Amino acid sequence: MSKVCPYCETLNKDEEEKCTACGVRFQSEIDFSQPIREMNQLATNLLQKKAIYPKDYLENAYKKIMESVQVIMDQTMFRVSDNLKDLKKIQEETRQDMEDEDFASFREFMKEFEVAQKQINQGLALARDSFFKTQSFEDLQKAHPDFSTASAVIQDGLSKMESLAIRSADPEIMTLTPIDIPQGVTQALESIEKAIAHINTFTETGEKIRLEDAAEQLEIALDHLADVLETYKEPAEELEAEEV
């Protein structure tokens, strides 16, 4: 099998990661769900077997998940960087003069990448300090709610990275100046993430209080969104008053 470089049209062997002629990196599929699958499978195995595992078992499992996450972060960064190179090539071919502000979206992408990376690391730290430090089946059961929350946080961070990888492939998006997201929208998203984590825990434990917590977080999210919508109403109301 062989593949053609999209830049210089050189024929390369299928196993090549970079073009042998121009050095461009070939893009491969990124499995953004792999760490979550590994975490869920690990938790299922531990809870079903009801066994006490050696300390290094959990340490090694955690390291494996960390490695999977790091691979995804690296691949995402490569993908966004490569897509920026594609954008520059389009610029050269069309001879379009793009000012610095035209790449504001790319800078914003990097900020979003850092936010997603921080979120994933927070989830990993929560899982490490609770679930991955247990030494008995009873400890596993007690730590499982925190593990579910950590999984939801990590999954959301990985979803953000997947969105970045997809969006960076669109030249139009990459050259559009990004809008400012109101703080209330960000706060609403955080509450929704917490609600999802509580719901996930409920599906695993059946604890009614988890649904109550989820409902409370959704109400908080609605309040944040209502506050943001009020800021959009004020200019319109002032305009109507002036017309009268």
Image: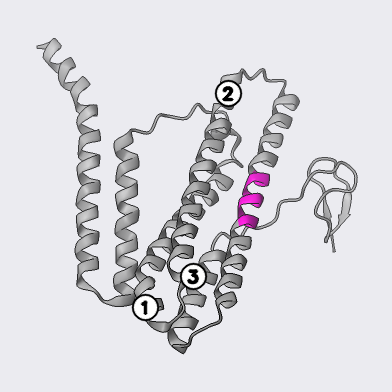
Is residue 120 toward the left or the right of residue 240 in the image? Answer: right
Question: Mark 2 or mark 1: which is in front?
Answer: 1
Q: Are marks 3 and 1 in contact (CB under 8 Å)?
A: no
Query: How are the colours assigned in the image?
Result: one colour
Quadrant occupied by the N terminus: bottom right
Residue ID at (44%, 55%): 156
Which label's residue is closer to the chain start, 2 or 1?
A: 2
Amino acid on which disc 3 is placed: Phe
Is residue 117 toward the left or the right of residue 83 in the image? Answer: left
What secondary structure characterizes most of the magenta part?
A: helix
Question: Residue 55 appears at what percent x and percent y?
Answer: 55, 76
Question: Mark 2 or mark 3: which is in front?
Answer: 3
Question: Residue 113 appears at what percent x and percent y?
Answer: 54, 43
Is residue 9 toward the left or the right of residue 82 in the image? Answer: right
Residue ID at (48%, 43%): 115
Which label's residue is closer to the chain start, 2 or 3?
A: 2
Give the camera-side residue of 149 and 181.
149
Pointer 1 local density, CA inside 10 Å: few below 14, some 14–19, many at least 20: some
User: Magenta segment: does it hold 78?
Assistant: yes
Q: Examine the rendered structure and indicate whether residue 84 appears above or below residue 74.
A: above
The residues tagged by marks 2 and 3 sit, at their Cα atoms, a distance apart of: 45 Å
Amino acid on which disc 1 is placed: Gln
Toward the left, the furthest residue is 244
Tally of marks: 3
Per the image, the residue denoted by label 2 is: 102
Which label's residue is closer to the chain start, 3 or 1?
A: 3
Instruction: Tell me the number on the disc at residue 141.
Output: 1
Q: Quadrant of residue 230?
A: top left
Which stretch is magenta?
A: 70-79
